[in-house]
Amino acid sequence: MSTPFSQRRDAFIKSLYALQAGAESGIPRRQSECRRTLAELRRGLASTSPQIGAYEVVFRHDPPEQELDAWLLIAGLFALHPQRGRSRGSLGTSMKALQVKRGDAAARRFEQLLLRNRDGLPHHVRQVIRLLASDDIPVNYATLLDDLVQLMSDGYRGDAAHHIRLRWARDFHTTTTTSSTNQDSASALEP
């Protein structure tokens, strides 16, 4: 019996975090190997075809054929913006944090992302991850992988893809705004 897709995805994401941990481990040989692998994954984003190192990282976890492009994209995105710990929320949550730092330009970029079809989505997601990396805003790669699997599939126009975009938009428009509204209300009550 094969391992369920969700468990394979989780193991894959854990292996990416392990690469980052290895790159920061302080063990010279492990650091070198992990940094080399992360560099290969980043190069895969710049070329039209992923590097051999990306195949090794991805195929080790037996991705379903229909999810392969999303897995390869996530591997490169993680290498572009690696993190120590896991973050929460969707890409909308991360983009809201970027908007708080950068203003309306981030909101326009997010709106453009929401409008992308399956073919244009990888390019726009790469651009968004670069922006998030420049401000050191964390990304939930496990959730992003799940979302991209759907958005890059044949069902990219279906209800599931629509709900992903709605969740991203909800997270963008409600994250932090709710907490700042609560703070404003509390300040108004103080004497």
Image: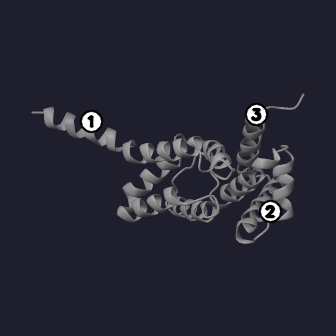
Q: According to the image, label 3 marks what residue?
A: 7
Q: Secondary structure at mark 2?
A: helix
Residue 106 appears in which quarter of the rendering?
A: bottom left
Q: Amino acid at mark 3?
A: Gln
Q: Position of residue 26 (x, y in %)?
A: 74, 52
Q: Is residue 87 left or right of residue 191?
A: right
Viewer-proximal residue among 153 and 38:
153
Q: Quick one: which residue is furthest to the right in this view?
A: 1
Q: Is residue 115 above or below residue 141?
A: below
Q: Secondary structure at mark 1?
A: helix
Other-residue count near label 1 (Cα within 10 Å), few / some / many at <14 / 14–19 / ≥20: few
Q: CA distance from mark 3 to mark 2?
A: 26 Å
User: What residue is at 65 percent from the left and 43 percent from the top?
Assistant: 146
Q: Nearer the viewer, mark 3 or mark 2?
A: 3
Q: Nearer the viewer, mark 2 or mark 1?
A: 1
Q: Nearer the viewer, mark 1 or mark 3?
A: 3
Q: Position of residue 20 (x, y in %)?
A: 71, 51
Q: Amino acid at mark 2?
A: Arg
Q: Is residue 94 above or below residue 8?
A: below
Q: Is residue 67 left or right of residue 127?
A: right
Q: Secondary structure at mark 3?
A: helix
Q: If the image is split into quadrants, where does the C terminus sit?
A: top left
Q: Amino acid at mark 1?
A: Asn
Q: If the image is split into quadrants, where does the N terminus sit?
A: top right
Q: Which mark is residue 36?
A: 2
Q: Position of residue 137 (x, y in %)?
A: 51, 53
Q: Quick one: which residue is furthest to the top in this view?
A: 1
Q: Which mark is residue 182?
A: 1
Q: Is residue 177 left or right of residue 130?
A: left
Q: Earlier in the sequence, mark 3 or mark 2?
A: 3
